[in-house]
Image (cartoon, rainbow, N blue to C red):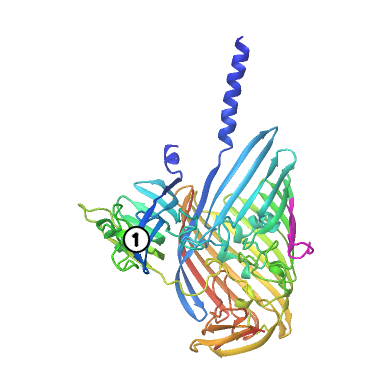
Amino acid sequence: MSAHAQSSVTLYGVIATGLTYSSNQQGHSSWQETSAATENTVFGLKGSEDLGGGSHAIFKLENGFNLNNGSSFNTSDAFGEQAYIGLQSDQFGTLLIGRQYDTLNDVLGPISAAGGTYGGNMAAHPFTFNNDNLAADSMSINNAVKYTSISYSGLSIEGMYALSNPGRRFFEQPRVLAQSHSAFASTIIVPRYAPPRPVQDGHRMHQCWGGLRGQFAGCADLGSQVEYICHT
Amino acid sequence: MKKPLLGAALMGVFAASAHAQSSVTLYGLIDAGITYSSNQSGHNAFQQSSGLVSNTVFGLKGSEDLGGGLHAIFRLEDGFNVNNGTSYFKNTIFGRQAYVGLQSNQYGQVTLGRQYDSVVDYLGPISLANFGDGNNLAAHPFDNDNLDDFFSINNAVKYTSPTYAGLTFGGLYGFSNQAGGFSNNRAYSFGASYSNGPLNLAAAYMLLNNAGGGPLQNNLTGAVSSADGDANIVSARQTVFGVGGNYAFGPATVGLLWTHTQFNNATAGGALSAFSTAMSGNMNLHLDNFEVNGHYALTSALSLNGAYTFTEGAYNSASGSGNPHWHQVTLQSDYSLSKRTDVYVEGVYQRVSAPVGSAFSGAAINGLSPSTSNSQVAATVGIRHRF
């Protein structure tokens, strides 16, 4: 029962907000209210279940948001900051799978003022794009498998690989399947591996590639060719 | 003088315990793995997958005791992809289920909101596609009968009866919410299940009018919405019905299921744009899915699960007609590390028979891009955790 009680989910968060003066942004000084200028403003769920024998099932689901307007930091994300699940062993280390910070951020971030909690995101290295991704609000990596060893006399090792996830998995993507369903009036057939080409789709032009990557209804597979069915 | 004091003290205790029962519960399920597929648009692929066996969700639920066997209940549940953090249902905050209602021990339950249809509620537990054992990959071709709960019904009012000697029944009506178009993009559904010891039986029916706005693209966001990606197949009318049952022999359970799906005037977008070829107009399509499935518990932690599905279809459209049929085999082994955490390995093989270049000539396991040949294999290893 005590193990069960320990393994319940924890709801947590960090809120960082402040007023920021800047000397020159596109020719003007400005006063702004900023969210996450230092630490990321987030809320999340995390948990650890004791599986016995020094191993745990762990997870974290964390979303970043802007305190000043309530919007999600990453548009259309449910848990855009971090989302992972994995197994942790006191003997063999930790294996995680999901959307995660990269290894530079994990290993060098704590040594940098940008990734630490004292300088924070505004202390990121130039340019505004945070060139080495050390700041806490840096990008996260999708489809990532990460291994972190246990500490051997203070030394630990970490490595990560993120899959490209080729192909189309409609039940995983935000499902934007609804396109125009009006009557189809014209059909264009191009070779499967043809370079991108513009295709007229009603009033709009689309870039279309070989394979099933058309931006509108009616891309179909004909073996060696790809058919684009356009409506007018 | 002591009695009233004792009474007051007891009332205080009861009030506190009732209050504790009615607190909100935060819950969820995370399913992630690595999947190999033999042929998607001509290439094999290794991919990281989310929710291939069970839907990856988090949610809030609660029940407040109103006294006299009556409860106020609610559930707010979102589906998401653990590998990139995105919401599964576009433009939603609780896209999988969101409802509130009253539950009476004597009269049953009435709920309002975004909910599963009766095919999912009653036939789902009989199918490997919704058993928690096979789910998305094991769905019938492009989840044509929605047993894998690809979509939920918006604006729905649902009744679920209490269980009378093993019998439970219920129904749902999803409003179109369109002024002047009461039946334009509406849904209704009903079903029943019977459970007696090792035996479970179920039957269900569902009808959708102009799902996703229909061929005329009027009222896109009714009972089955295009805005959140639910309207995977847009047609003037979709009918689904089926019956099934299973029986437990000690550690083994064997199930049989038949569903029939009919699409009238289905348009070429959505799932059909990816799964069919040579389709240059709207089509009428019907499919019969026959599934036999089994579950065997080798130990309390290790189980073997499998299903074979034969799907027979017929379509006609301006560009021709045909009678495709599909064979699909799913095998899975699952090992529980605890009651809440398990690891699994699953393989799916699908073979389709349809003339090359015709509609549906490429095999297409649910959730993958179609194969360029008439067969497709998927194999996945993953972990699942509930909280």
Q: Is residue B182 above or below residue A181?
A: above
* The one of B142 and B200 positioned closer to us in this rendering: B142
The residue positioned 34% from the left and 59% from the top of the image is A121
Q: Secondary structure at mark 1?
A: strand
* The one of A57 and B3 positioned closer to us in this rendering: B3
Corner quadrant of residue B21: top right
The residue positioned 65% from the left and 61% from the top of the image is B147
Is residue B206 something one can see in this rendering? no
Q: Residue furthest front?
A: A28
**In the figure, is residue B242 to the left or right of B77?**
right
Q: Which residue is mark 1?
A: A22
Question: Is-magenta flag for residue B58?
Answer: no
Q: Which residues are magenta?
A: B170-192
Image quarter in which the N terminus of chain B is found: top right
> What x and y, as percent, mark residue B359?
65, 81
The residue positioned 57% from the left and 51% from the top of the image is B251
Question: Is-magenta flag for residue B181?
Answer: yes
> What x and y, as percent, mark residue B19?
58, 33
